[in-house]
Image (cartoon, rainbow, N blue to C red):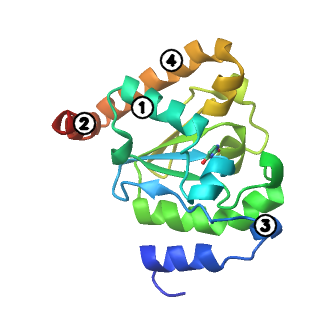
Amino acid sequence: MPEMTWELFEEQVEACRLCSLCRGIQHKVPGQGDRRSPLMLIGEGPGQTEDEQGLAFVGAAGQLLTRMLQAIGLPRERVYICNVVKCRPPGNRVPTPEEAAACRIHLRNQTWLVRPKVIVLLGSTAAKALLDPEIRITRERGRWTERKGVWMMPTYHPSALLRDETKKPQAWEDMKSLREKLKELGLYRDLYEANEEQD
Ligand code: URA
């Protein structure tokens, strides 16, 4: 296998036909953000706005995510954001485990390229794909797991917060826990200071 590079990753995502999700989409949505960020956020899959623009988390859920990051002092530009699947599932349905598995190679390459120290799993599709296929997000959210030196935490998907506001206090607890983890690992100052400079 040739050595993975961002160029190769992008070419492979663009050319990918490993599952049928690519039929009928407008754009592939590989992910975007700071490719050297210590923090990676992984969602489920592109929605309509993301499919139209080819960018992850730019619709209503994405705007809420931006505000959640801002609330703990993190500028979104300093974070890398992507999804389990890179093509919009029809009608925004949940990707099947087979679709998530087919797309896994791209997520694996991307994670290898970014080399994050902390990964936040947004919603149960991401938590199932990366932590445990049987995971229950309501029970496991906010819990940290370390795998090969990378800290991972599942939390509610921002779309779930838009549908059910009563989940917001728990999501806020998780964001504060993320801030604490970044501080504990000595990563917060860099991310936060980048924010200060922008103000
Ligand atoms: N929901 C996701 O999981 N990802 C996006 O990019 C947008 C909405």
Residue 105 is situated, as x and y percent measured from the top left of the image, at 63, 69
Sequence-first tag of 1 and 2? 1
Q: Nearer the viewer, mark 4 or mark 3?
A: 3
Q: CA distance from mark 1 to mark 3?
A: 32 Å
Q: Residue at x 51, y 35 (%)?
A: 63
Q: CA distance from mark 4 to mark 3?
A: 39 Å
The answer to whether the residue labelled 1 contacts the one labelled 3, judged by CB atoms less than 8 Å apart, is no
Quickly name the residue at label 3.
Answer: 24
Please tell me how crowded label 3 is: few (under 14), some (14-19), or many (20+) other residues with Cα within 10 Å: few
Q: Residue at x 69, y 28 (%)?
A: 160
Quickly name the residue at label 4.
Answer: 173
Q: Amino acid at mark 1?
A: Leu
The answer to whether the residue labelled 4 contacts the one labelled 2, judged by CB atoms less than 8 Å apart, is no
The answer to whether the residue labelled 2 contacts the one labelled 3, judged by CB atoms less than 8 Å apart, is no
Please tell me how crowded label 1 is: few (under 14), some (14-19), or many (20+) other residues with Cα within 10 Å: some
Q: CA distance from mark 2 to mark 3?
A: 38 Å
Q: CA distance from mark 1 to mark 2?
A: 11 Å
Q: Residue at x 60, y 67 (%)?
A: 106
Q: CA distance from mark 4 to mark 1?
A: 13 Å
Quickly name the residue at label 2.
Answer: 195
Q: What is the secondary structure assignment of the residue under circle 1?
A: helix
Sequence-first tag of 4 and 2? 4
Q: Amino acid at mark 3?
A: Gly
Quickly name the residue at label 1.
Answer: 69
